[in-house]
């Protein structure tokens, strides 16, 4: 436990105080900011146009926040691997990995500690996006509870990207390769949803729909939190952290 | 304290270390010597649990390194070939991180860090980032991290590389001060260091131990060689016969007027030999004690094509 805390805190500080993080946070903020502006203007335009509404008001959450949070998720597919890229690959390159492997700590301590560090940094980034609903709350009424459920989904899928990014980092010594691999893993996860469309048989379709990350995320974004969804995300996150632990352990036995 | 039995490490078809066995008692300081690529670092990596052997076992304090890794690693302070540093961290923060990893009790962390900093003279740079330090200082930070948990066993891979002569002398006196309380094994190419600090040395070449010797001369047991030049050859045979009759003389080689006498070296024996030669018909011109320096031993043993079998000499 102590080792996990020490590793998590050390890696968290290292990432947050690095120029790479400032650049990523800046780029993300810039992209989200411009997207937010465009989306709000479009929503306002649509709301003011009675022809498009066909009677009744547009729901702020469904028509604005879902697309905003989805957009954050898409940016994270690329940004999270850039944050997690140095977690393990840099250790190997600067030879500090020897310190971790010869200390009285387990490979699990290392994997979990680094996952917590990456997750903590990604929470900081998610925190930046909370600015937009907070700003809107001055001008419009919406349900914070539903929004928080959507954010819970975002947090879970981000944790999944962190776990995948960490796994990618443990595979290679090169940070560049680590980023590329991380993005590829994230994209594979997203494209697996396509398999649902080509699956035959109702059981196969149900299975592929269950393991489809976009489907599971969308359920949260809509505001529905299900045990099945939580279990799915937690299992997959734990699975990839476990794979990282195996990669770390394998280094000892080469 | 450290026991290595039949350790073998194979990379593909290359044997990095081949059936290595040795024991180091508690409180001993042992020098680990060998040419580049001999297997020193590999052996140290296996003892510290960084890498697993292909076969054989390594035990520290009676516990197997791979059966109880966490318990064993608590007892070890290890400095690898390249110090495992985090460039972006400050020296003191880094040592605190290492202390946490090594489960130093929270109330003792400050005390242990202060000890490590003063033992390696790092107090003036304690608040500087490691990337801003010179190589010598970084090496000292590496040594400090090995010391910070005050481990029972210190395993140092080339601890004085990159240090200036003053710093080398300080590390030497540090190792001397740790003798007895800590078990130390360190590898180096600087043979004078081994002679200055170690009680024993192990020479390894091509993955095998080729020499395993004590540097502390037991009373009257070390063999010495004397080279002497005589005045004339006529009395040589008589002199050689008389020398061979002495109990402590092992062998006498004749080369014209020169004699090379190998004997059990005590100061009284040396006096007797010089008396015998001087009072003989052959006469005495010059008399000098030849002692193989460690460097000579090292070069002699490691430059041979075929390596000797391991064993005590």
Image: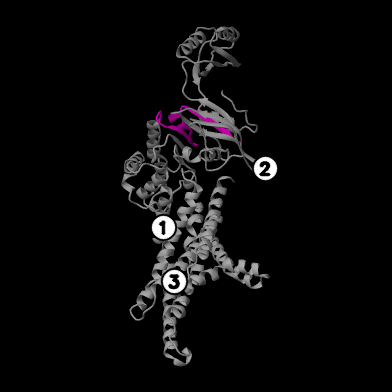
- Disc 3 packing (10 Å; few <14; some 14–19; many ≥20): some
Mark 3 sits on what residue? A28
| Segment tinted magenta in the rendering | B179-206
Work out whether A106 lies above or below A64.
above
Discs 3 and 2 share one subunit:
no
The residue wearing badge 1 is A12
Q: Secondary structure at mark 3?
A: helix
Q: What residue is drawn where x is 37% and y is 31%?
A: B177
Which color scheme did the rendering employ for the protein? one colour
Residue identifier under label 2: B13
Residue B269 forms part of the magenta stretch = no
Residues tagged by mark 2 and mark 1 found on one chain of the structure: no
The earlier-in-sequence mark between 1 and 3 is: 1
CA–CA distance in space, label 3 to label 2 = 50 Å
Query: Residue at position x 53%, y 7% from top?
Result: B280
Residue at 33% x, 48% y is B125
- Separation of marks 2 and 1 at Cα, in angstroms: 42 Å
């Amino acid at each position: 436990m102590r080792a996990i805390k020490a590793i998590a805190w050390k890696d968290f500080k290292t990432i947050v105080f690095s120029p790479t993080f400032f650049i990523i946070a800046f780029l993300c903020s810039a992209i989200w900011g411009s997207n937010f502006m465009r989306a709000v203007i479009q929503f306002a335009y649509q709301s003011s146009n009675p022809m498009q509404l066909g009677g009744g008001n547009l729901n702020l959450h469904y028509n604005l926040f879902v697309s905003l949070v989805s957009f954050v998720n898409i940016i994270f597919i690329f940004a999270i691997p850039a944050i997690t890229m140095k977690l393990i690959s840099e250790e190997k390159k600067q030879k500090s990995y020897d310190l971790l492997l010869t200390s009285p700590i387990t490979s699990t301590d290392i994997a979990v500690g680094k996952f917590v560090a990456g997750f903590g940094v990604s929470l900081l980034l998610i925190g930046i996006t909370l600015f937009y609903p907070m700003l809107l709350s001055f001008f419009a009424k919406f349900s914070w509870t539903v929004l928080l459920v959507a954010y819970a989904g975002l947090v879970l899928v981000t944790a999944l990207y962190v776990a995948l990014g960490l796994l990618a980092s443990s595979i290679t010594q090169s940070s560049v390769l680590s980023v590329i691999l991380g993005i590829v893993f994230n994209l594979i996860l997203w494209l697996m949803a396509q398999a649902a469309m080509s699956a035959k048989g109702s059981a196969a379709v149900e299975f592929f729909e269950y393991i489809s990350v976009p489907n599971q995320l969308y359920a949260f974004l809509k505001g529905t939190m299900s045990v099945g969804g939580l279990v799915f995300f937690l299992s997959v996150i734990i699975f990839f952290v476990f794979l990282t632990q195996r990669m770390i352990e394998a280094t000892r036995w080469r | 304290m450290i026991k290595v039995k039949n350790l073998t490490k194979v990379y593909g078809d290359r044997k990095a270390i081949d059936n290595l066995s040795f024991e180091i008692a508690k409180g001993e300081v042992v020098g680990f010597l060998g040419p580049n690529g001999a297997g020193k670092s590999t052996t140290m990596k296996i003892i510290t649990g960084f890498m697993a052997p292909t076969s054989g076992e390594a035990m520290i304090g009676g516990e197997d390194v791979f059966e109880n890794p966490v318990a064993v690693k608590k007892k070890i302070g290890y400095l690898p070939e390249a110090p495992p540093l985090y460039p972006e961290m400050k020296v003191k923060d880094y040592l605190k991180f290492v202390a946490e990893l090594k489960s130093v009790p929270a109330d003792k962390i400050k005390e242990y860090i202060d000890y490590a900093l003063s033992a390696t003279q790092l107090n003036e740079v304690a608040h500087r980032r490691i990337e801003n330090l010179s190589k010598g200082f970084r090496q000292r930070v590496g040594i400090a991290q090995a010391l910070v948990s005050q481990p029972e066993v210190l395993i140092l891979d080339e601890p004085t590389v990159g240090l200036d002569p003053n710093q080398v002398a300080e590390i030497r006196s540090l190792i001397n001060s740790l003798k007895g309380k800590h078990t130390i094994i360190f590898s180096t190419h600087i043979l004078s260091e081994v002679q200055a600090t170690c009680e024993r040395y192990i020479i390894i070449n091509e993955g095998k131990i080729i020499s395993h010797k004590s540097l502390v001369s037991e009373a009257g047991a070390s063999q010495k060689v004397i080279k002497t030049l005589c005045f004339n050859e006529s009395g040589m045979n008589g002199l050689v016969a008389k020398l061979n009759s002495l109990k402590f003389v092992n062998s006498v080689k004749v080369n014209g007027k020169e004699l090379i006498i190998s004997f059990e070296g005590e100061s009284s024996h040396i006096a007797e030999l010089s008396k015998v030669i001087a009072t003989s018909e052959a006469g005495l011109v010059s008399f000098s004690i030849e002692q193989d320096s460690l460097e000579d031993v090292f070069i002699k043993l490691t430059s041979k094509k075929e390596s000797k079998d391991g064993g005590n000499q």
